[in-house]
Image: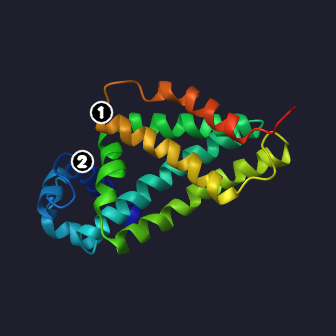
Amino acid sequence: MKKNKPKYKQIIDAAVEVIAENGYHSSQVSRIAKKAGVADGTIYLYFKNKEDILVSLFQNKMGQFVEKIEEETTAQDNASDKLRSLIDMHFSQLSADHHLAIVTQLELRQSNKELRQKINDVLKRYLAVIDAIVQEGIDEQIFRDDLDRRLVRQMIFGTMDETVTNWVMKDERYNLVKQSAEVHRMLVNGLARNTV
């Protein structure tokens, strides 16, 4: 399978860098090939076109991203700890990869509707992790049971997403991971059952 070949990974990694540094629209396939150390034609053995590179890049990187988050959250004992782990992992993975943060937070937003749809399909697995944590919190009676699950998912993902986007826009001048505890506290307080 193509995805297991070393050149596939080289091209994906090169594409992340080239797109982060030049923007998606200014990133020629030839530039990605040069950065990957492969001939231009080699790219087309793995990808149909530049859009396919962007979608594949997101599928590949997001797949790894979600796998790590699933592993980390599964290891936690309750929904609150799982949510904290999810936020920690989201922030730490993106803060550790400057180029990927730029691509996910800025470049993917400028893409066309069809491309955004393909990206949303990739996100479904991640959103399912959030849904499972929320449901567990309700079952454990940590979170309220009158919550609009879809709205809660949007709130959790949107809060993390905007926090990372703001960090990228501010040229990563502060520690993103240190925002994790406060984001967790605000989200959990918003979801918590009234104990009064």
What is the quadrant of the N terminus in the image? bottom left
Q: Nearer the viewer, residue 1 or 124?
A: 124
- Three-letter residue code for mark 2: Ala
What is the quadrant of the C terminus in the image? top right
Q: How many marks?
A: 2
Q: Is residue 133 left or right of residue 53?
A: right
> Could you tell me which residue is drawn at 43 percent across and 29 percent down?
176
> Could you tell me which residue is drawn at 53 percent across and 37 percent down?
89
- Scheme of image coloration: rainbow
Q: Is residue 36 left or right of residue 97?
A: left
Is residue 73 in view? yes
Kindly state the secondary structure of the residue where label 2 is placed: helix
Name the residue carrying label 2: 20
Is there a contact, CB below 8 Å, between mark 1 and mark 2?
no
Specify the quadrant of the image occupied by residue 41.
bottom left
Q: Position of residue 82 (x, y in %)?
A: 68, 39
Q: Nearer the viewer, residue 83 or 36?
A: 83
> Could you tell me which residue is drawn at 69 percent across and 57 percent down?
149
Name the residue carrying label 1: 170
Q: Earlier in the sequence, mark 1 or mark 2?
A: 2
On residue 149, the disc is: none
Work out how far the residue at label 1 is from the one at label 2, CA to CA, in angstroms: 15 Å
